Image (spheres, rainbow, N blue to C red):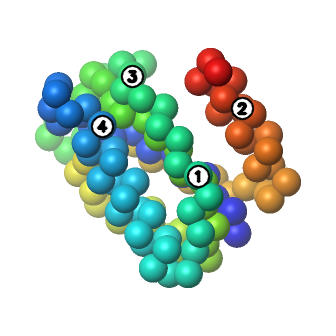
């Protein structure tokens, strides 16, 4: 099945704002590939201020690094991804949507429009 994963990662250092997001994307991508899935696309949406102060266990966040990942995998892998992201302290928020295959072209157009390209 085709899934879209949206993640907001914490910004741990002002000099390396994308470091946490890159590590999370790499971890999720390896999890998908190791379980016979396919990563179709990863889109970096950049570092943005959050609409409100978001709290995790002991931290308050004012900005976050956003990215989207489009991938194919089984339902079991999807559940494992959500379980690992839920327990990851680097993740502020995450959302996973199941997509239909015919939505891929409209997905790419929507991301380009959102990015202003």
Give yes or no for contact between labels 1 and 4 (Cβ–Cβ under 8 Å): no
Which comes sooner in the sequence, label 4 or label 3?
4
Which comes sooner in the sequence, label 4 or label 2?
4
- The mark lying in front, picked from 2 and 1, is 1
- C-alpha separation, residue under disc 4 versus residue under disc 3: 11 Å
- C-alpha separation, residue under disc 2 versus residue under disc 1: 14 Å
Give the quadrant of the C terminus.
Answer: top right
Which comes sooner in the sequence, label 1 or label 3?
1
The residue indicated by pointer 1 is 41
Question: Residue at image x 71%, y 40%?
Answer: 108
- The mark lying in front, picked from 4 and 3, is 4
- Residue 57 appears left or right of 9: left
Per the image, label 2 sits on a secondary structure element best described as helix
Give the quadrant of the N terminus.
Answer: bottom right
- In the rendered structure, find residue 18 and report the number of the disc placed on it: 4
Look at the image and tell me whether residue 13 can be seen.
yes
The residue indicated by pointer 3 is 48
Counting labels gives: 4
- Residue 5 percent location from the top left of the image: 54, 51
Question: Residue at image x 62%, y 18%?
Answer: 116
The residue indicated by pointer 2 is 110
């Amino acid at each position: 099945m085709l899934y879209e994963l949206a993640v907001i990662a914490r910004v741990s250092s002002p000099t390396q704002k994308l470091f946490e997001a890159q590590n999370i994307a790499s971890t999720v991508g390896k999890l998908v590939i190791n379980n016979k899935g396919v990563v179709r696309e990863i889109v970096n949406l950049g570092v943005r201020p959050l609409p409100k102060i978001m709290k995790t266990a002991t931290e308050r966040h004012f900005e976050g690094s956003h990215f989207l990942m489009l991938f194919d995998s089984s339902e079991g892998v999807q559940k494992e991804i959500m379980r690992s992201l839920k327990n990851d302290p680097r993740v502020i928020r995450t959302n996973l949507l199941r997509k239909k295959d015919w939505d891929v072209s409209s997905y790419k157009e929507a991301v380009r429009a959102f990015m202003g390209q």
